[in-house]
Image: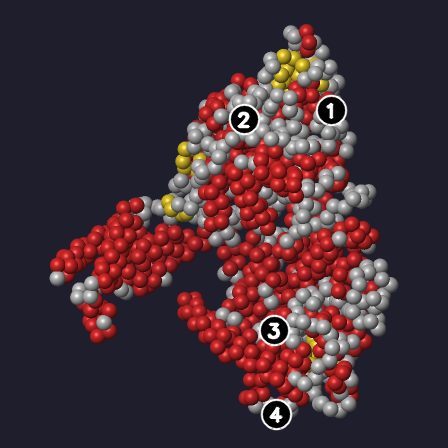
Amino acid sequence: MVLNTWFLDHLYNLDTIIRIGWLALIFAPFNKISKYCIILPTLLFSVECILVLLFGDSPMLNWISLKDLLMAIIVQRKQFYLMDLWIAQWMVYNFYAGCGKTASCGSFHINKTWTSERYVFTILLFLTYLAAPLGLVFYIVGKHSFLKEYQKNVQNAIKNDYFHIDQLKHPFSTPHTVRFADKLPESLSSIYYFLLGIIGLTTLFTIVLPSYIGLIIYCRIVYKYSSSSLSDLKTIPEALRNVTAEMRLTLIKTDRNQRRLIWHLKYLLLQFATIFEYASNYSEPFRLFRSLEEYFRKIYHTPYFVLGNGIAVNSYDIVKRYIQDLPPRKDAELLAWEISPSLETFCDFTTVFLSTNHPDTQLGRKIIFQWLHSFPHNLKHRNFEMELQLSRIVPRHMDKKPTKDLVYQAVGEVMFFLATNGELTKSERLAYISCVQSPFIFFPNWFNFLFNGHYFERKNLSNYYTLLRAFLRYENGSALQAAFMAAEKKKSHEEVLKFITVVFCVAGSPAPAKLAVTVIDRLWADKEKNVPLFKKNPHNFIKECARLDKAVPTVNVLATDEIVSEVEKSFEGKIKISENTPVHCSIVNANRDKAVFENPDEFIPDRLDLNKILVWNGVEEDIINPDQSKRPIRYCPGHDLSLDIVQYVAERFLPVTDDIDEDNNNKNEQDLIVFEQKIRKLTPNEESHCWNVLDTYTKVVRLLMTIVINESNLFPSRAIDIAPPMHLPVKNFSIFRIDMAKFIPSWDEDKPNGSRPLRKFARWLVNSNIWDFYDCLAGFDTLEQALAWRSQIFPSLPLPNIVYTDMFSDEAMSRLAFFGCACHYTQRIDKSEQPALQNAVYVNDMTVLSIFRVRRPFERYGAAAYFDGDFQLIAIYWCHANRVVRKDDQFWEHAKYVWRSSFFAYVTIHDHLIVTHMIECNALVTATRKYLTNDHPLRLFLQPFTYHTVSVNYQAAISLVNRRGLVHRVWAFDYDEFLKVCDYISMTYKFRLLPEYIPSSMSPENNSKSKEQWDKVYPIYSDMNHFWKIIHKYVENFFHITFNVQDDDKLPMDTHMTEFINELCKQLGIPGIVSLKRFIDVLAHLIASSTGMHEHVGQISDYVIDPRFIGAKLQEGKEIQNIQTYTQILILTVVTGVRMPGLLEDWSHLIERNQYYEKNLANYENFKNELKNLSQDIDHRNKTRKYPFESFNPKFIECSASV
Ligand SMILES: [Fe+2]
């Protein structure tokens, strides 16, 4: 009784605590106390319940008696208040996720201002409390009424493909109705499909699968025939496949008028069995078809057999005749069963399934031919621009075999680029991969119902619409315009567009994508044997792969009179089939027919009978007949295109072999191949030895790095993915101060939802303070071992812009000083006062870092290299030893190593990390996003140059430059000393325009050289200036067009711009900008800094392919990096080498469609053309320069400091 009283007292208290929880949630939704105020009553309630259950005579026990349960629910409402409290917390997150923002670190940052939406939401929260347990209903209603527009705008802004909103509203891209539920409002439709999914899965598991098991048992019982001579197919038991085949035969023999309910039920079960059998033999369907054929040959002495809903045939002669010689009759069928209504109704006008002599079919083929022939690009006629774009879309990848998805994506993107001269966004690429991977749209309606109520089929259809919108973006392009023309107004643009989409999604790309995977698999399986075969004749290699491949296993026709009589005759009159019975022609078996192909199961690209293959809906030798009138009626219009695309993609993923390819035009790539060929394999003992010496941090980071790299490589960002500025009601983007006294924003509108959970977890793990910190000095046993370690553990190292094969000779030092990443520090000197340096004319002084202490036992950084008038190295001042080292000195090699390492450290920390990222790019992005409204023309103009900058700076701040972070570990400074380095750099930073980065002493005039002569020995001078002029002109024209200003002295009257300028001045230490001319100069420099300068100082992969090139830490007597430091610097190289949108990629979608659009577009196109010309010019001049110089070659430059 005492306990009872205790409970009763507390019931009142609990109510009060719950009410406090509600008030806290309403007025301080993200305060920690609010969380505790929700958790506390829940805990108390739980404790009460447990105690009540333990003590039987308590009043609470009555609640669990059925008799009083109803009354308890009506009378006691506190449990509902509590339950609704949790629901309300979800509502809070749901609501503020719309109007607030999620920082990239994953924490919430809300808009705390009392907007009208927040008032409404607060009222809803009150109502939720008062109306418990019905509070959620109010929120749902509110969300879909008053808050709807508001939520929609914010969500649209958050969508990555925000800028396609106009297209989403385009009538062409509105999904059609497949089922009645598609007409319902979205919420009702979702409920309908959810329920349908449950019913479907229940039916699958309670009726269909048990029936199928029953069928298996039945087949085993009734099957009498058994012969070991039959095919050894193991995946489907002989009894099952043969008895079901007999049952199917009985079904198709049944006259159409006599097909009753039981016939249909049997039919469905056997269709399910067909799909199951096919799926079980997906990788080698020819084995299934062959075994069925063998059975029918034994029993009925006929080459025909039964498959799915019709007759099938493997014989080459018959297949050839049915798909090529006889007038074909077609239906909406694929792979031995009907297709889904989604596919059937997507496009009324399609020849994919109806390739006959029907006028519509003829028109369809004409449209496709016109479309294909009007592609803006053709792989057979490549130009500079095309090569450039394709090389960015599919970068050369030779380190390891690519994943299937990577190959699928490459094929899809290449084909889309050839067709449109455009790019697919990330979501469109995902849709394409899904189209290739997921076949559910090809399955019948009833089958898709079983699998989650048509969920997968509808997802496929949604992907089709996604790709339709992608084509819609380029509807004014030459190919689509030609297709519209070819339709001769007989078909609407919508029908033509859907037709093109379905061709791309069904017929055009998945088959070549899968074929490309087969080709690449074979190349990597035995590269020494197969790569030479491929190079000898790529098309033959691909055709032979296609012959043995299963990308298109069957082609279907309907039985004509002629076929019906042939089949009946073959069965010696034992069966009769109806006209229009499906006939499945097995391409995979016809291409392995022994009667036609010698050693049909062997891979022989040189085979004489290769052109007999039936892959592209006809015999190859007929398809390639120059006389077009003699080509097969149904041959695939994309035959040539698919071969070219597969060849191109295979070449991009071609493994490296021991052969030297004399024909390779890419010298850089060829140099790397030659370099890599010399590297041996790491033995397991060596690998474990090297791995074991690493500290735990390095091991963990190395492992987690793969998560980041795999994701980034699979879904690299493209310029098309750069969204316009978001229209959000808040400007706050969570700026915080880091140790380096810099203010870094943490929320990036380019990545509004932050990183994926796995990536967040990886970052959290890496930044935990649980990892040891020590400088392991263990070195590699041999250089070969070090190279093998790099090659094996870091296969995804980015391809260097320049492949240095020598970085040790004196000549190489000259090259580094005048062509390397620190060449802007090289300057001419007056006569040296030091006698040892009397001949010195040039110096590259990297002694600054010598004033900073390093950890023991390492040497201080710092050295200055001196060169004579012929640019030859004559001496090095070595700071650590405080002496000048000359050629014949015993420390000569070490001094060179110290100088290389010092300039690498200085350029990486000073130029790349602090000046470019933390000062200039950070100033540009923070000022832009804080002070320019989303619709401000300048904000839109700068959008590509600030893409992802917030994210990369934030990640660098929390994972690289933090205490015990990667930079702290890679270089030898103690953390406090590193901060002093940063302070020193910040203090000595002085804003300079790009051309001012080159000392005036390094002009051609001051060196008595012509521009041409000087370019051969000091190329940065012309390249940087040329690049600067292009950027400057682009910015200048933009202001003249958009702000209509003629006078360069006057800044436009614009308060936002004034605030923006003030912020820039504050962050960059500029005294003030009072003229437009100066403003243009500053902006042009910031853009050049984010692009060209960032490439010049940030391309570190050139310097790490050999551990002797540079040392991040210096150690007495060592001119090679130790295992741990080398591993750490390779990690840094890989994570900063992720691909980002290129400067030459297309971001014209960001140009505002206002009255200045045409002029701005012309300015943009002119800018791109000038950059392309510069790239070509640099390529050309690199051939005559002493060494190539690529830092300001636009083809290598990214459009922002995004990595
Ligand atoms: Fe960078």
Mark closer to the chain start, 4 or 1: 4
Give above or below for 44 relative to 874.
Answer: below
Q: Secondary structure at mark 2?
A: loop
* Render colour scheme: secondary structure
Name the side, left or right, on which 90 lies relative to 37: right
- Looking at marks 1 and 2 on the same chain, the residue that comes earlier in the sequence is marked by 1
- Work out how far the residue at label 4 is from the one at label 3, CA to CA, in angstroms: 29 Å
Whole-angstrom CA distance, mark 1 to mark 3, is 66 Å
Query: What residue is shown with label 3?
Result: 276
Labelled disc at residue 972: 2
User: Who's the residue at 12% across and 59% down the image?
Assistant: 2
Q: Marks 1 and 2: which is nearer the front?
A: 2
Residue that numbered label 4 is attached to:
257
Q: Nearer the viewer, residue 1046 or 990?
A: 990
Name the residue rendered at 82%, 71% in the picture. 594
| Disc 4: CA contacts within 10 A as few (<14), some (14-19) or many (>=20) | few
On the picture, is 991 further left or further right than 511?
left
Do tag 4 and tag 1 residues touch (Cβ < 8 Å)?
no
Between the C-alphas of marks 2 and 4, the distance is 87 Å
Does the rendering let one see residue 973?
yes
Q: Label 1: which residue?
A: 809
